[in-house]
Amino acid sequence: TSPSDFSKYLIEIMKGFKGSGTLLSSHSYKEMFHIQVRNTEERNKHVGLFWGINEDGIIGHTGGDPGVTTICSFDPVKDRGYYFVTNMSDDIIEIDDTIEKIWNIVINQKLN
């Protein structure tokens, strides 16, 4: 998918979280973000359907294939969505630290 198309999808997911999405029913959105599993070992996340929910309230999903890494998340309090894609796999140890540093800069950036 293109970054433009993915951003449209993320905006819809954010709207669905707030109860105004149109892609799925409101019941489906509620179920999607309902915590299904608590305190998984991966960064102490809670898990909904397809979405991880961090203890700080950030909701996200990651993925990839050989040669591609993607991170998608949103902060419902700040009403901000984030999408990161790179043409490197996260199985390369050196890239993990770099991706995490870039990600932390982006999500902690102040808006003017």
Image (tube, grey):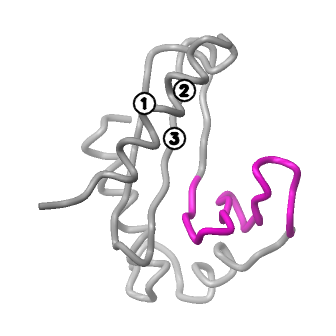
User: Which comes sooner in the sequence, label 1 or label 2?
Assistant: 2
Q: Amino acid at mark 1?
A: Val
| Secondary structure, magenta segment, majority class | loop
Image quarter of the C terminus: bottom left
Q: Using residue 95 as the reference point, say whether residue 80 is left or right of it.
A: left
Q: Using residue 40 as the reference point, say whether residue 35 is left or right of it.
A: left
State the mark number for residue 66.
Answer: none
Image quarter of the N terminus: top left
Say which of 60 and 104 sits in front: 104
| Mark 3 surroundings: few (<14), some (14-19) or many (≥20) residues within 10 A | some
What is the spatial separation of the Cα atoms under label 3 and label 1, in whole angstroms?
7 Å
Q: Are marks 1 and 2 in contact (CB under 8 Å)?
A: yes
Decide: is 101 above or below 41.
Answer: above
Residue reaching furthest to the left: 112
Residue with the mark numbered 2: 69
Q: Secondary structure at mark 1?
A: strand
Residue with the mark numbered 3: 71
Q: Which image quarter: residue 111?
A: bottom left
- Residue displayed at 54% across by 26% down: 69
Residue with the mark numbered 1: 85
| Mark 2 surroundings: few (<14), some (14-19) or many (≥20) residues within 10 A | many
User: Which comes sooner in the sequence, label 3 or label 1?
Assistant: 3
Q: Amino acid at mark 2?
A: Thr
Q: Residue 38: x, y in percent?
A: 86, 69
Q: Using residue 23 as the reference point, say whether residue 50 is left or right of it.
A: right
Region of the chain picked out in magenta, as a range: 38-60
Q: Residue 31: x, y in percent?
A: 69, 80
- Residue displayed at 61% across by 36% down: 63
